[in-house]
Amino acid sequence: MERSLTQIALFAALIAALGLIPQLTLAFGVPVTAQSLGIMLCGTVLGAKRGGLAALLFVGLVAIGLPLLAGGRGGLGLFASPTAGFLIGFPVAAFATGWVTERLSGMGVAWAAGIAALIGGVVVLYAFGVTGMSLVLGKTWLEAALLMTAFIPGDVIKAVLAALVTAALYRARPASVASRA
C-alpha cells in the first residue's frame, strides 16, 4: 500500500516536472508540452489502476490551483479552456495505456509499452482533447481534429520514448514496472 502511494505521488510529480520543459503554444491556444509523455509513462510503468490514479492526482492538484501545467498554469479556469479535454482525459488516457500494457504481457516490454502508449496516450487522449476543443472553440469535431494533426508526429515520438524508457527501466529493475507484475 505504501509503495503504491509513493509511486502514484512520484508519477504525479513526474507529469508536473515534464511541464517545466519549455512549451510551444500554437495559434489556436493549445500548447505542445512533454506532459503527455508523463501520462504515457504512468500507464506503461505503473499499470492501469496506479497510472490512472497518478494522473487523477495531478489533475486534482491542477484543479485546486497549483501551477503544475506547462507555463505555470493551474486552477478551475483551465476546465473551460481549449485544453480542457486533454486535462480531463489525462486519467482516462493513463488508465487506458496501463490497461493495454497489462493485456500485452506476452509481448516484449518495449513493443507492449509502445503500442499501449499509442492507443492510450495518443488515441484516447486525442478523443478527449479534440472533443473538448470542439466544444470550447465552437468547431465541429472534424474541424477540431484537423487542428490537432500537427501534434501527431510529436506524440508518436513521445510514445516511442515511453516504450524505450519503460523497457530500460524493466531491464534495470523489473520489479519497478508494475504493469508487468
Image: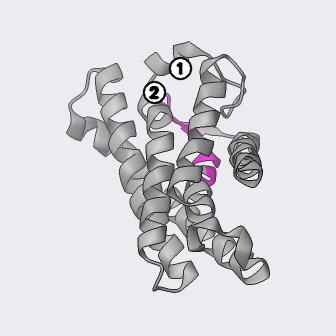
**Rendered location of residue 27, percent (x, y):** 48, 31
Residue in the image at 55% along x and 60% along y:
47
Q: Decide if residue 112 is in sight here.
A: yes
Question: What secondary structure is found at the residue carrying circle 1?
Answer: helix
Q: Which mark is residue 164?
A: none
Q: Which residues make up the magenta segment?
A: 25-38
Q: Locate residue 67, reporting x and y percent.
A: 72, 24
The crowding category of the residue bearing disc 1, from other C-alpha atoms within 10 Å (few below 14, some 14 to 19, many at least 20), is: some
Identify which amino acid the numbered label 1 is placed on.
Leu
Image marks 1 and 2: residues in contact by CB distance under 8 Å: yes
Q: 116 left or right of 128? A: right
Q: Residues within 10 Å of mark 2 (few under 14, many from 20)?
A: many
Residue at label 1? 78
Q: Which mark is residue 84?
A: 2
Residue 65 on the magenta segment: no
Give the answer, above or below, for where 30 lies relative to 138.
Answer: below
The quadrant the C terminus occupies is bottom right
Asked where in the image residue 60 lies, by quadrant, the reply is: top right
Residue 57 is situated, as x and y percent measured from the top left of the image, at 63, 35
**Viewer-nearest residue: 165 or 20:** 165
In this view, the residue in front, 146 or 119, is: 119
Distance (Cα) linking label 1 and label 2: 6 Å
Q: In terms of depth relative to the viewer, which is nearer, 82 or 78?
A: 78
